[in-house]
Image: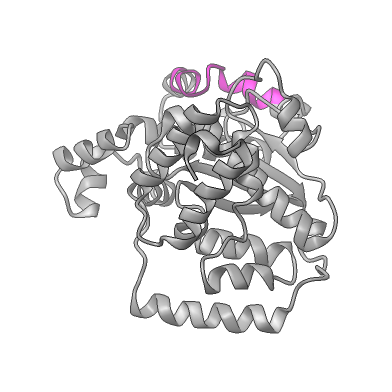
Amino acid sequence: MPDTLQGPGDKVQHLQHQLDHDERISPSHYLQLLKNLIRALDSADTSFMLGQQMLPGHYGEVSHALLQAPNLRQALHILVRYQSKLCPLLQPRFREEAGIAILYWSDSFGAPSLLPFLVEMHMTAVTSMCRWLSGERLAWRFCFNRSSPRHNEQHRLHLGADLRFNCQLDAMLINATCLDRPWPRGNAMASTLILQNLEQQALLAPVLPSLLGAVYDYLLRNIRTAPNLETCAHDFGISPATMKRHLTRHGTHFQAELDQVRTHVALHLFQSLGYDNEAVASYLGFHDSNNFRRSFKRWTGQTPSLMRDALLAGTMNFN
């Protein structure tokens, strides 16, 4: 069908068909397809429409495992474990703390200009899939690392009214009591058997993480040792110049990646563990509180004291 004869829904379905049935598609090709679609449709709901059709998808056994997931916990485990197939452009990570389940997203392949679009698309995908598999609309809360759009009608329509902007991360939150609530479509035995088979396949043909995903995880593991470009490159088995070049190709640089991880860890320590400024500074390897204060303000635009007070007061809720 010529593009000129296709309506918005047709174009969205055409793109999703390409993604579902061409496992050879590269992330850069995927991003270019999205850019072309955004330009062609010029519509405020494109990201949400794509998200509605994204999951469980048609990605073989991993999609079948999602369809058979007995509850939200299993579904999120599958999403995180098999991110490279289900959502290769963004990396989901899961935390459970203080009675709250947190699914937060970071860039996998360096698309800063498309990040708001991708976040909307992926959050809609998870929301829509969970609504279908659970048989109810789950009480998600949404945090966006961006300013509020001039019009957020599409966010409210597709995600709900519990929206927070100007956060320091892109995250979906839900009460942890929802994690193990049985889903009517689920089959725990079938899902477990499929996952066991997938794990055996992964042993034979391991899937490497994206560079940005690997760097994030490395920094998270080593955040207390004040990692730098040189040590990171050494541990990755490449030169600092090569690491810098790879990060540049992904639209970022080492300091930006380090600042992102430090911000996420600081938020966790402030809100979930109740650390004060000095304790967070020490945890992150800062020996001078003034240096930490300046750095934190550069990362977030706020001083650590203001951020901590806002988190504890609930005016910047992540729970």
Q: State the image quarter where residue 277 is shown.
A: top right
Q: Is residue 198 visible from the viewing direction of this image?
A: yes
In the rendering, at what x and y percent does residue 52 appear? 66, 48
In the rendering, at what x and y percent does residue 144 appear? 62, 31
Compared across the picture, whether 250 is left or right of 301 comes to: left
In the rendering, at what x and y percent does residue 110 appear? 37, 37
What predominant SS class does the magenta segment belong to?
helix
The magenta span reads 294-310
Q: Is residue 262 visible from the viewing direction of this image?
A: no
Which quarter of the image is occupied by the C terminus?
Answer: top right
- Residue at 52 percent across and 22 percent down: it is 300
Looking at the picture, tell me which residue is in the foreground, 298 or 17: 17
Q: State the image quarter where residue 155 is shown.
A: top right
In the rendering, at what x and y percent does residue 184 appear? 83, 70
Looking at the picture, tell me which residue is in the foreground, 32 or 191: 32
- Residue at 63 percent across and 26 percent down: it is 44
- Residue at 26 percent across and 33 percent down: it is 248
Instruction: Tell me: residue 121, above or below residue 116.
Output: below
Instruction: Tell me: residue 54, above or below residue 253.
Output: below
Colour pattern of the rendering = one colour
Whether the magenta-drawn stretch holds residue 256 is answered as no
Number of labels in the image equals 0
- Residue at 46 percent across and 62 percent down: it is 21
Instruction: Tell me: residue 282, above or below residue 193.
Output: above
Compared across the picture, whether 71 is left or right of 9 comes to: right
Whether the magenta-drawn stretch holds residue 301 is answered as yes
